[in-house]
């Protein structure tokens, strides 16, 4: 793949896909932060969960909430001191790897759309981890590093699924809350998976054709 062409294509995809989705992600999150109540209070330096500000959109199926996720999917790492820093580094490394693999021409077929989607998702959640901790009133007098360590991803889309409740009874059917950035990453992962399947099928077809030709 011509490097100049590859760079030009990536820039176009970023402008038409990454930037609009990133803006949508941040606008929706900041609307939640400015509109919904913080789900905890800090007493003597300790967090005390007081319940989520939940607003039903479709009763029994879809709610808007304000959830602070310092970990990753399914809340892994939430409430730990290491999660904000570790996952911040992970997101930065992921950005570097995406750009590296794009230059190597790794994104082809359906997966060519995954790069701008991954960038939108990673940048959206990275922005949260870098800045959201500084807006928490409870930590306004804390040190820079402590406020940075309070960074979290704003999750607000809450769906209740009866099938999920059967699989995970403790969840009461609520799929882990997510946001626009998470959706971008999920779609990108699906495209990468589909591309891998297509490549495997093509390789199998080529081998089969070679075998026939050899006969």
Image (spheres, rainbow, N blue to C red):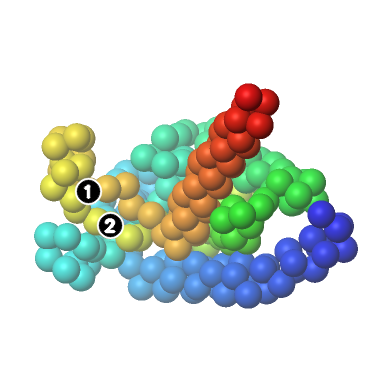
Q: Quadrant of the C terminus?
A: top right
- Tag 1 near tag 2, CB within 8 Å: yes
First-in-chain label (1 vs 2): 2
- The answer for how far apart the CA atoms under marks 1 and 2 are is 7 Å
For the residue pair 80 and 115, the one nearer the viewer reads as 115
On the image, numbered disc 2 is attached to which residue? 158
Q: For the N terminus, give its image quadrant.
A: bottom right
Q: Is residue 139 above or below residue 202?
A: below
Residue 106 visible somewhere in the drawing: yes
Q: Residue 196, how many percent across, how many down? A: 55, 41
User: Which residue does the numbered mark 1 point to in the structure image?
Assistant: 174
Report which quarter residue 9 is drawn in: bottom right
Assess disc 1: are there few (<14), some (14-19) or many (≥20) residues with their C-alpha within 10 Å of its C-alpha. many
Residue 155 location, x and y as percent?
Answer: 39, 56
Q: Nearer the viewer, residue 63 or 146?
A: 63
**Residue 12 on image: x %, y %:** 71, 72
Q: Nearer the viewer, residue 125 or 134?
A: 125
Secondary structure under tag 2 reads: strand
């Amino acid at each position: 793949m011509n490097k100049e062409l590859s760079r030009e294509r990536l820039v176009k995809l970023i402008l038409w896909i990454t930037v609009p989705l990133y803006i949508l992600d941040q606008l929706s999150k900041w609307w939640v932060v400015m509109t919904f109540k913080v789900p905890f209070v800090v007493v003597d330096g300790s967090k005390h969960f007081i319940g989520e500000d939940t607003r039903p959109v479709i009763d029994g199926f879809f709610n808007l909430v304000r959830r602070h996720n310092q970990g990753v999917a399914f809340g892994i790492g939430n409430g730990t001191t290491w999660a904000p820093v570790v996952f911040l580094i992970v997101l930065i490394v992921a950005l570097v790897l995406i750009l590296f693999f794009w230059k190597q021409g790794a994104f082809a077929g359906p997966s060519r759309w995954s790069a701008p989607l991954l960038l939108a998702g990673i940048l959206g959640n990275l922005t949260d981890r870098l800045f959201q901790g500084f807006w928490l009133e409870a930590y306004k007098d804390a040190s820079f590093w402590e406020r940075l360590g309070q960074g979290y991803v704003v999750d607000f889309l809450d769906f209740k699924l009866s099938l999920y409740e059967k699989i995970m009874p403790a969840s009461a059917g609520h799929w882990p809350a997510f946001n626009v950035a998470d959706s971008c990453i999920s779609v990108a992962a699906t495209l990468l998976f589909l591309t891998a399947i297509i490549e495997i099928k093509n390789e199998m077809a080529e081998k089969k054709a070679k075998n026939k030709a050899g006969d």
